[in-house]
Amino acid sequence: MKAHPLVSVVVCTYNRAEYLDVCLLSLHRQSYPDYEIIVVNGPSTDGTDRVLAKYPDIRVILQKELNGLSFARNLGIRVAEGEIVAFIDDDAVADAHWLDRLATGYTDQEVGGVGGLVYGPRRTHYHFDNGIIGKCGIPDPIRDPAATAKKGEFAILMGTNCSFLRSALLEVGGFDPYFRYYHDESELCVRITKARYRIVYQRDAFVVHYMVEGHNRRSPYDQNWYEIVKNVVYYTMKNFGGELQSYSTRPLYSCYWWLSHFKDDYFARQMSFREFRDICRKVLQGSLRGYRDGLNFNFASVKNNRARDFISDIPEDMFGVWKPPEKSETEAVQQSGSEEPEERPEAKRSGRIPSPLKIAYISQEYSRDCIGGNCFHTRNLARGFADIGHEVHVIALSETRRAQDYMDGSVHVHKVPPYPTDSLNLKLTEDMPVSRKNIAFSYAAALKLIELKRMSGVQIAEAPLWDAQGFVLSLVSPVPLVIRLVTPLCKFIEIQKMGITKDLRVANWLEGETLRRADKLIAISNNIGTLIKEHHKGIGNGKIAYGPLGIDLPDKELLKTAKSGEELGILYVGRLEKRKGIDTLFKAVPRVVREMPNAMFTIVGKDTDLAPGGGSYRKYLLKRMERKYHKFMVFTDFVTSEQLQEYYRNCDIFVAPSLYESFGQIYIEAMAWGKPVIGCNVGGIPEVIEDGRTGFVISPEDANELAERIIALRDINLRKQMGQRGRKAVEDVFSVRNMVEKTSEVYRELV
């Protein structure tokens, strides 16, 4: 081997643009003289392309579908040109001498892999230090650096800091795609060791791993335990299938080990009974699936394919080479002469770049995987302003009732517990839960904002109208306050046919008082602005600005072309409740199926207990539908943001016959993927859907009209035309950039 063999560094990424940027920066600062960087991309939908365009010297492979980490790594191996292939996760940062120290571990041709130490965030603890794995599939990731593997143990490396001889990878066939997540690198290390190579631990070749949320890991207890335990059992049976213990004591011990691990946490009150029950169920299901697959591998027809080459087996139509979009001549001149951050939108009008703002957003919900619309638009606003250089803080409700501060990319997030209302000496009795809840969060948010003004110099704050989250801020006025106008309480009461109580009257007054005291209001649709003025008196005409919501658009290369003759996928996204129009859709299904037997309805949304008389709304809907139509319905509960984008991408028609939407973000999300959409002629929906051009606008609760419009869209050319126009509308009107520009005008006026 040469003194400095070419090293191919492979980074697999999916919807982590802000972390990928930092990772790539650390790779560009390596001291090693001869290496290439290969990024295997998602297909991401979060603006990753903008990050990749900043690094024109890297090679980018675009996956057509999300097929698991092993598949993505095999793609990297397939196109790699180096003698050594190194792997790092997109949420990790490499030491400047990382590649140098990995390369020095290849002392002879018997070394098949080299890896190093993995620190946790801020280097306060270790994620991996000289780990090993046994035949039961239970790893020991942190050991004495000088310890060696005993009989029955195998040296392993962590996937975010590992490298292998490319020839060794080709010899054993690469990563096994069965391991989509967890044990993928450990199982590979075992096969490489069994092929008579050595795995070397080079402790000074270290990386820092931030281990952020993702589609497989959302919190310490909310992980894909089914996949994890399935892989543990399969690992044992696949690699040690010639030993009787692999069919008896080893799988039993692995299952027992995982259950015991969570039992201790449950009795220590670190998780709820529901969390513990759900994890136990997934552990048992995963164990059984792994055992079944292990038996198939060793005894069924799969046995003939044991020595598969997972690298060469990848069909060429499953990936492509990504190229950055063409730059205009002006952009090329600007970027070649400067490395300044992207120009802020307001600079294009004024000819100068104003100083960055310090903004605080108030939102009860804020997370990577939003459920409510307020979370979505707050997250898009926060990230949009942060991306162009403003300092952004988000004050959100803590799910654990403990204060917590963390970074979401460039956004400062502050989770606060609700303030105890009993200590405020307010006459809010126990039979006023809505008002008590609203005051509790609003008070806590105001205290945090006052602290941020003092510590960080926050200049302006924005809150949604929902639940009067800005009420206390409107009273104390530490900074100018903007309220984003969304569905008011009065409309919610009307749709849900709720009786008026003392609690709801007080909550309605809190909402109106917040609006009257705020410095500016931004209506997300003209309809909502008019409704608010009519219901809450004392709001002047000049106080309301108009600013539609916006989203990040997926890359055009990811859009699916409509095809005829296949199953026609009809997608609904929304909670299962009357307000969302799910009853109307269910009534339309029989007629649609009679006309189009290839129709399949996918319902993505959380079940509720709002059925008439109480109970599950899903059961209520299915009970009212003839059983023969049940096979045309597929229900999916909560999904992550990334999974939701895949549902939009794969559907043919999007339907949401809501009885009211103040705006309708779900429609623009579907339109961004080039899908025709159907909504009702209520609220702000007609301002989003252009009837007959980007979709259809129907009368609310008219199941016959809904069925007619769905049937009309079996015309593939009509679907294509509407989809293209819808995509163009999102680009021109409903983008994050447009939302930030219009919002910035309001902020500048007040600061």
Image (cartoon, rainbow, N blue to C red):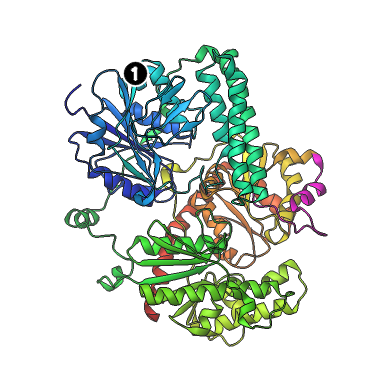
Tell which of 265 and 496 is nearer to you.
265
Amino acid identity at mark 1: Tyr
Tell which of 120 and 151 is nearer to you.
151
Is disc 1 placed on a helix, strand or loop? loop
- The answer to whether 669 is drawn above or below residue 169 in the figure is below
Crowd class of label 1 (few under 14; some 14 to 19; many from 20; radius 10 Å):
some
User: Splitting the image into 4 quarters, where does residue 516 fall?
Assistant: bottom right
Residue shown at the point (45%, 36%) measured from the top left? 64
Expressed as whole percent of the image width and height from the top left, the position of residue 473 reads 51, 79
Q: Residue 569 in magenta? A: no
Query: Which residue range is magenta in the image?
Result: 604-627
Quadrant containing the C terminus in the rendered view: bottom left
Expressed as whole percent of the image width and height from the top left, the position of residue 622 reads 78, 47
- The residue carrying mark 1 is 197
User: Splitting the image into 4 quarters, where does residue 611 fall?
Assistant: bottom right
Residue shown at the point (65%, 77%) measured from the top left? 422
The reply, left or right, for residue 731 in relation to residue 575 is: left
